Amino acid sequence: MKSILLFLLKSFWLSKGKLFLCIFSAVISAAGISSVVYSFALSERDFKENFSKTNPVDLVLYLDQVNEGMIKKIRRHKDVETIERREITSGRIKNTSDNWMAFVLYGVENIEKPLISKFDIEAKKSLQGTWLCVEKSCTQFVAPTGAELVMQFRETQVVKVKNTGTVHDPGLAPGSMEQAVYAYTSLENFENLIGQSQSEQRFLIKVKLQNPSKDDLKAIGNALSVLVKSSGGVVKTMLIPPPGEHPHQNIVNGVSFLLKIFGFVISLLGIILLSLILITWLYPQIPHIGIIKTLGGSSRNIRTSYFAILFLIIGIGLLIGLPLGYLIGQGYSNTIAFFQNFTPIKAPLPVTTHLLAIFSALILPFLLATIPLVNASRISVQSALSKVFYIPNKAFFKSTQAFIKNSSLKYGINNLFRTSSRTLLISLLFIMGFGLFITGANLKYSIQEDFRNLDKNSYYNVTVFLGDTLRGKLDFLEKLPFVDATSYVSRKSGSFTLAGQANPENTALKILSPDYVLSDALLMLGKIQKNCPDCIYIGMKYQSDFKQTALGDTIFFSSNGHKKPFIFSGVVKDLGSHPPALYQFNSVPNEIYRDLAIKVKDGFSLEVAKAQIEAACQDNGIEVKGITDATTRMTSLQNHLEPTFKIIEITGFLTLVLGLIGMLIVIGLSLQERSRETGIIKALGGTAVQISRLVLIEYLMVSVVCIAVGTGFSYFFTTVMGNILGTLILGSPILASFNWPYLVLTIVLLLVVLTLFISVYSYNKVKQSSNSLLNQVF
C-alpha cells in the first residue's frame, strides 16, 4: 500500500496544475459550506446579545382616563411581568444640510434605566434642563453633541433643544435606512416640548409567558382591556408587534434566504469542480490500476490509497477554506447587524461551532468525490488494461458517422463524448454558473420593473397627511398651477375580525371618495367596485392573515364601539404603505378627511411641489403632519433592497466565474490528453490554426448548448426565487421579468471572450512540432 500511495503522490506532483486545481476546488467547497455555518452562528449570537437583551415589548396600549389604581391593577395582573410608560410623537428636524427630515421623539419614564425595550445611553453630557439624546445611527444627519437641534412638532412652533448625547437602541431600524432621526428624553422634557395635553398615555407591557404567539398576546390584551374598562378607563388602541421579530425582520429573512442559496451554490460548484478534476486525474491512471492489480495490489489497498490522497486534498482545502468561510460569515453577520441596528459581537465562537463547520466541510465533498474513486478501484484487470481513454461511446460514434457529414463537426462531437461523465459535469457546472448569473441580473431587474410598474400605475404621486381632521374642499390647493387632481381621503382607526377569529387585528380604514383613481393593475386579487360601499380591500401586508379567507367572505370592522360587516373584495398592492391599511370606496364624496392624494402634473419637480403644498397649507392655517411622494417611497424601498441586490450580483458573478474556470480546466486537460493525437494530425499536414479551430468548434458547441439550457434554467429559478424573495421582503411575489438586452449582450460578450481565449490558448498548446507532440507521454 505504501508504494501505491507514493505512486499517487508522485503522479500528482508531476501534474502540479491538476494538484493546484484540486486544492482550489476543495478550498471553494470548504469556504462555501463553512460560510453558511459561521454566518448563522454569528448572526444568531448578535441577535441574542443585542435584540433579545432589550427585553422587547409584547403589547402597546394607548389609554384614556388613566388613574394610578388602574396602572397598579395592570401591574398586578397574573400575565403581566411589568408595565412602563413611553410616549412617542413625530415631527421634523433640521439636518446638517438645513433641510427638514422626519423626526421621532420618545419620552421615557425610566430614562436612565428602562425596563422594557431597553436602550443604552452611550455618551452623555449634563441631562439638566431641556435635553435629548440622538440614536447613534442618526448622528450623521444632525449637529453633534453639545449643539442645538432645530425641530418642530404638531401644533407647536419651531423649538431648539440641546443635543446632550447618543443612545443605542437595537430594537429600532437604523435611521440611515429609514431616512429619519430618532431621539430620547425624559417624560418631563417630552411633555414640556409638545404639551402635556398632547401626551397619548402610551404604555409598554411585557408579559410573563415565554415565547408567546400573536394569539396569546391578543388574548392577554383583551383581558387587560376589560380590566382597564372596569377601572374607569378606555383602551383607545392596542398594538401587538410581531413576537420576537425585529422591525427589519423581512429584509433579514430575505438576506438569510439568499445566504442559504449562496452557500449551497458555491459548495455545489466547488464539489462539482473537485469531482471533475478527480475524474480527469483518474482516467489516464486506469491502466496503471490494472498493472498494480496484476502485481498483487488489492482493490482495498488501491481504494485506501486514493482515499488518503483525497483526505489530504480536502484537508488542505479546509486549512485555507475555513478562514475564508469565517470571513464570509463575518461579512454576512455585519450586514445583518447593520440592517438591525446591532453592534456585532467580537468574542470567539465556541469550539462546537468550529467542529460543526469542519465536519460539514469535510464530509460533503468526501461523499461525492468517493463515487469516481470507488468505481476506479473496483475495475477489473482486463478492463483496466484494455481501457483506451480516447475511444468514444461506440453507439454514439456510429450515429455521428451516419448523420453528421461535416468532418470538423463530427470530430468535435466525438471528442466531447470520449468521457461522458466529464462532459456532463462540465455542462452542469457551466449551466449553473451562467444560469445563476442571469438569474441574479433578472431578479434585480424584476424588482426594479415591479417598482416602475407600481409607479406608472399609481395615479397620485404626492400624499399629504394632515395634523387634524378637516371638512370642506381646499380650493387654494386645487388652484395651484402644478396640481392636476386632488382627492380627499378619510381615515378611521379600529380593528378587523375575520369569521371565526377570536381576537381582532388593529388597523386603519382608509375611506376613498368616488373620484379616487385606483387602477385595476394595482389589485393583486379581486376587482374595483366603486358602487359597492360595503366592499372592503386589504393592503398586501395583510395577505398572511387572509390566507383562509375567500373573496366574498365577511370581514367585521370595529371603530369607536361600532361593529360593521364588510365584503372582502380584493388585495391592493400598496407597496411602501406604512402602516398597512384596509380600503373602502364611499358612495358620496368625503366631506370629512384626514389625508390628501394629489396628482402633480408631469414635468413638475415633486420636491418643489411638496414644498409649495406645505407652504400653502401653513399660510391657510392648516397643519401638515407629513408629506411624501411616490419617487421618494420607491427610492427608500430600493435603498432597503440595495444590499440584497449586491448579494445577488456577487453570487451570480462568482458562479459564472467558477463555471468558466471549470470549462477552461477541461479544455487544458483535453488538449494535454490529445498531445499524441494532435502530433499525428500535424504530421499528416494539419496546421496549428486548423487544429485550434477544431477545438474551438468543439467547446463553442458545449457553450451554446449550456447557454441555451442555462437561460431556461434562469427563467425557472427567477420565478421561484422571485416568489420566495418577494414574499419574504416585500410581502408579495415578484413577477419574473427578463432583461433581454442584458441577456443578449452577456451572451455575445461571453461567446467572444470564450472564442478568443480558446483560440489563443489552444493555438499555443498545439503550435509545437509534430515530433515534440508525439514524444509526450500523458
Image: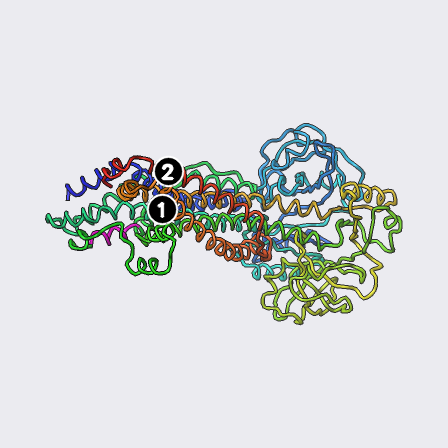
Q: Element at badge 2?
A: helix
**Residue 313 visible (yes or no):** no
| Residue placed furthest toward the front | 685
Is the N terminus in the top left, top right, bottom left or bottom right quadrant?
top left
Quick one: label 1, few (<14), some, or many (20+) residues within 10 Å?
A: many
Is the C terminus in the top left, top right, bottom left or bottom right quadrant?
top left
Residue 375 appears at what percent x and percent y? 24, 54
Residue at 72 percent across and 30 percent down: it is 148
Residue 189 vs residue 241: left or right?
right
Q: Earlier in the sequence, mark 1 or mark 2?
A: 1
Residue 105 appears at what percent x and percent y? 69, 41
Establish if 97 lies above or below 277. above
- Pointer 1 residue: 273
Quick one: label 2, few (<14), some, or many (20+) residues within 10 Å?
A: some
The numbered dot on residue 763 is 2
Which sits in the foreground, 558 or 113?
558
Residue 108 appears at what percent x and percent y? 65, 42
Which sits in the foreground, 747 or 401?
401
**Magenta stretch in the rendered image:** 369-378
Residue 727, magenta (yes or no): no
